[in-house]
Amino acid sequence: MKKLFSSPFFKTLFIIQLFFLLIFFFQYNSSNALAQDISENKLLLASPYSNSNDSFISLYSANIPKNKIAYLTFDDGPSNNTEKILKILDDYNIKATFFVTGTSAKRGLKIYKAIVNKGHSIGNHTYSHNYSKIYKSIEDFISDFKKLENYLNNSLGVSTNIVRLPGGSNNTISHKYGGNNIMVSISKYLIDNGYTYFDWNVDSTDACVKTQDKNKIVNSILSNSKNKNAIIILMHDGPLKTTTVEALPEIISGLKKQGFEFRPLSSEEYVTQFLRAK
Ligand SMILES: [Zn+2]
């Protein structure tokens, strides 16, 4: 018997068994590590805004109109593109919404005035639009936000209660500067103080790259507007957004063909918010 176990056959069998045991051991450990990676990744990837949370609603809409209404919105101006857009809107006799940032330049002031005098809505998109500044804390947000509000008030005599938050109300870049609850705090502040902030349900994609292809802008808007009744379209009128200007006539005629009317935003109009504090 002893001889049998010490035979080369059993020695080989023992080595093979040991080999499989080792493989099993490493696989078990690495599969554990993999599971850990996945769960850690999930924690990293999953926005806290996608989890159920008592402090906010994930998607909120109100004042849904009966007719098909399109709200053209332009963020980040004033710039020379704003002037071109204003001209096109005049040609079509359409009113839109401009969520402006702060500038004390004379030309900027002239553009703010033109927006208001032509009957468009003007909204607060913060003075600096600098994420590391505005999303650092609720106090920093209020100070930058109020800076633009006071500036528009003093220079134009206009007070606006409509707002678009840079990056949208559920942006997570802000977490890097002000922690995971900064947007909930900002939302609460705006609601409690009588402001209405607007996100969007149609993205022109003109912010995906520095200057987006004109046809991509037109196609993205016209295809995403189909089967919707109220649309808030996100566009930009910063200095690089020349193709947004070029796309605008096709966007307007395409939306008209789909049966849309155009209106400027106000707190009484359709509102959609990605995140709303309860
Ligand atoms: Zn912006």
Image (cartoon, helix red, strand yellow):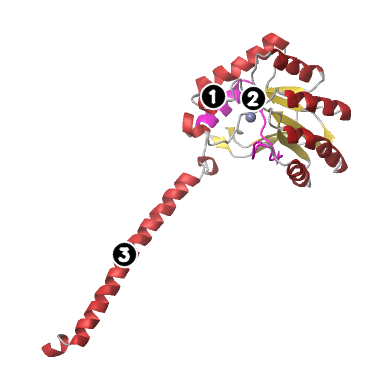
Which percent across, then down, holds residue 250?
A: 83, 39
Q: Element under label 2?
A: loop
Q: Does the residue labelled 3 lie within 8 Å of ligand 1?
A: no
Horizontal arrangement in the rendering, residue 197 relative to residue 252 (left or right): left
Does the rendering let one see residue 265? no
Whether residue 37 appears in magenta in the rendering, the answer is no
In the picture of the structure, the residue carrying the numbered disc 2 is 125
Which stretch is magenta? 181-210
In the picture of the structure, the residue carrying the numbered disc 1 is 134
Q: Element under label 3?
A: helix
Against 37, is 183 above or below?
Answer: above
| Quadrant housing the N terminus | bottom left
Q: How crowded is mark 1: few (under 14 residues within 10 Å), some or many (20 or more)?
A: many
Q: Which of 138 and 211 is in front in this view?
A: 211
Which numbered marker is on residue 26? Answer: 3
Residue type, mark 3 in image:
Phe
Q: Is mark 1 within 8 Å of ligand 1?
A: no
Q: How crowded is mark 2: few (under 14 residues within 10 Å), some or many (20 or more)?
A: many
* Quadrant in which residue 82 is drawn: top right
Does the rendering let one see residue 141? yes
Residue type, mark 2 in image:
His
Whether residue 186 appears in magenta in the rendering, the answer is yes
Residue type, mark 1 in image:
Ile
Q: How crowded is mark 3: few (under 14 residues within 10 Å), some or many (20 or more)?
A: few
* Quadrant in which residue 236 is drawn: top right
Say whether disc 2 or disc 1 marks the residue closer to the N-terminus. 2
Q: Is mark 2 within 8 Å of ligand 1?
A: yes
Say whether disc 1 or disc 3 marks the residue closer to the N-terminus. 3
